[in-house]
Structures are given as C-alpha cells and as structure tokens.
Amino acid sequence: MLKRITLKNMTVFSETDLKFGRNLNVIIGENGAGKTHLLKMIYSVLAVSAEEGRKPKTSIPTKSFLQTRLADKLVNIFRPESLGRLAKRQQGRQRCDIHLVFEQSNCDIAFSFAGNSKTEVSIEKLPEAWIDVSPAYLPTRELLTIFPNFISVYEGHYLEFEETWRDTCLLLGALIQRGPKEKRIRELLEPLEIAMGGAIELDKNGRFYLRNDSGRMEMPLVAEGLRKLGMLARLIATGALLDKGYLFWDEPEANLNPVLIKQVAKSILDLCDSGIQVFIATHSLFLLRELEILLSDKNHKKVKSKFFGLHQTEDGVKIDQGSSIDDIGDIAALDEELAQSDRFLAVD
C-alpha cells in the first residue's frame, strides 16, 4: 500500500503532501489542475519498481540503476522535451523533489531533479526492495482497438505515444488467470459482461472481440464506452486486478453514459474490496455522487477512501484532502453542474 507522497516544485505544484486511503483515492479538479500529472508521477515510480521486482533474477535496488531508469520512465510517460521540464518553471524554484512512503518502509523512495536535468535523477532515499505487483494504468482512451501489433511497433520505432499505452497493452495481452482464483474473477466479471452484452476475447490473430450468443463483434465496431469497460474486464480476467496491486484510472467516466458510469463505480469499489488500491482522476459530479452512495452501503463499509480537491492559486495548485467530498472545498467544475441543474429547474 502507498501511504503518502510529498511533492515540491513538480509541474503545477509548489509543495504538497498527500496522505492516501488504503483502498480508494479520488482526485478531483478542473482541467489543468494537475490530476493526470499526479497519477502519472506515482505510476511511473511504481512501474519501474514492479518491472524489476518481477524479474526472475532481480538484484537489490541501486542508485546507479534508478538514476537513469526513473528518468527514462518519467520522460516516456510524460513526454516532455527533457526531464527538467517537469520541474515547476518559476524563478527560484527549479528543483523538483518527490518522496513516496509505503506501508512497507523498505520500499520508500525519494528523488529529485533540477530544471536543467536531461537523463538522470538524484536518489535521496534508496529503497531496499522492489514492489512485487504491477500497477495498471487506464488512460482516457481505450486501447483494445489499437492492440494488434502495437507493442512490437512501439518497441521497434519511436512513437509519440506515452508509455502507459505500451505498459497497459502488455497487461491486456497476458494469459487468462486459471486456478483457485477463477471464482472471484467470475464474480467481478459478471456485472461488467452484463453491461457490455458479452465477454472480451483475444483471438490468435492478436485482435480483441466482444463475444456473445450471436457471435463475435470486432472491437472497432463496439461502442467506445463499452471498450473502456472491456479493458477493465480484461485486466480482471488476466489477474492483473484481483487481490492486490494498484489501479490508476484517468477519467473513468469519459465516453460513458450514466448507466455505465454506475457500473464503473460499483466495479471500482468491488476491486477495492478485493485488495486493490485504486487512484482515479475525475471531474464528474455523477461519478462522485455514485461513489458516495455506494460507500454508504454496508457492503462496502470496509473500504477506506480519501478525496483530494485540486485548486489553482497564484502560487501553484493547492490540495485539500479528507475522507469525504465535503472536505475538499469547492470545485468549479462540480459547481457548474449544480448551477446548471438549478437553471434547468427554473426554466418555465
């Protein structure tokens, strides 16, 4: 479990300290407030650690390895012109400091880089061990339609696609989980497959299909919102999201109608109940309300959640945090949705 992250002078953030919930973490803010930057920074560090931790003959962490590997990952995920571009560009504040604290303290890591850094970070605190589970990152765009040959093309050529796409495609192409965990997988998959009207299937030709009693439908012919559900279903089926690990989901509500958003909210909390630590970025009032409704249900009473409100100020983005939406201050995007409802009710 990731307990907290402290950031200093990273992109739009001057200085902040986020303390995460064990299960669900919801990051809320307007466009440009840095929601995706937070997800990507945390994911990048976890992904580097997990990639090494799952190697059969891995070695203990070293400064020389992390100095270049972390820098490479950050550049490949964020796609800046150079690493130093991730430092907050303000006079006198050109050094970025990052510190992650885990429940298992031997995984703690701290590093920094200057505004002119290009290929290396400076390791301030070296972890003693790698994490043993792979994080999953679901971007705003679905990836099932681009999956055929994407990994081989990405690794053989330079493409201006962020590396989260490549990482997630690797997870999507993994083998279906078999064995004693199949029962739990079916419990998580069943409501998603009902919502999609079928099951996700990966053919020998490397293409995904939606299969039901009527046959198979090519993924490009499936509605985009259903494809997003399909990505989640596939990660559950392969065991990438089952009983431990991390899920980062950028705007789960994108391209989904309210009926499907309700299913997404339920699936997110079902994953939390299974032991997954979930981080989502959103500005959807409907999704937030649905999460609050479900969190109040006795079936999810064990879910420990935190909400983070991102507010733009003259000195960078300020973050309010707490155990409910009431603790994070006013978010303009949410207020506009409420104001529109009032205007609609006032129409004669």
Image (cartoon, rainbow, N blue to C red):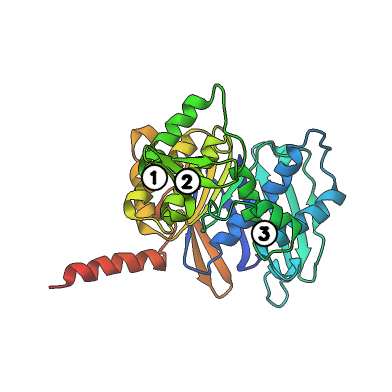
Foreground pick, 71 / 292: 71
How would you rate the neighbour count of disc 3 (Cα within 10 Å): few for under 14, some for 14-19, many for 20 or more? Answer: many
How far across and down, in percent of the image, does residue 118 sit?
80, 67
Foreground pick, 175 / 329: 175
Q: Secondary structure at mark 2?
A: helix
Vertical comparison of 323 with 257: above or below: above
Distance from Cα at disc 1 to Cα at disc 3:
30 Å
Tell me the quadrant of the picture where the C terminus can be found: bottom left
Going by the image, does 286 lie left or right of 138? Answer: left
Q: Which residue was labeled with disc 2?
A: 230
- The answer to whether residue 23 of the structure is visible from this angle is no
Which residue is pictured at 65% across the width and 37% down the height? 133
Q: Nearer the viewer, mark 2 or mark 3?
A: 2
Going by the image, does 263 lie left or right of 168? Answer: left
Tell me the quadrant of the picture where the N terminus can be found: top right
Foreground pick, 2 / 284: 284
Q: Secondary structure at mark 3?
A: helix
Residue type indicated by callout 1 = Met
Which residue is pictured at 58% across the width and 70% down the height? 316
Distance from Cα at disc 2 to Cα at disc 3:
23 Å
Farthest residue, direction bottom: 91
Q: Which mark is residue 77?
A: 3
Residue type indicated by callout 2 = Gly
Q: Nearer the viewer, mark 1 or mark 3?
A: 1
How would you rate the neighbour count of disc 2 (Cα within 10 Å): few for under 14, some for 14-19, many for 20 or more? Answer: many
Which residue is pictured at 48% across the width and 55% down the height? 220
Q: Which residue was labeled with disc 1?
A: 196
Location of residue 14 (image quadrant): bottom right
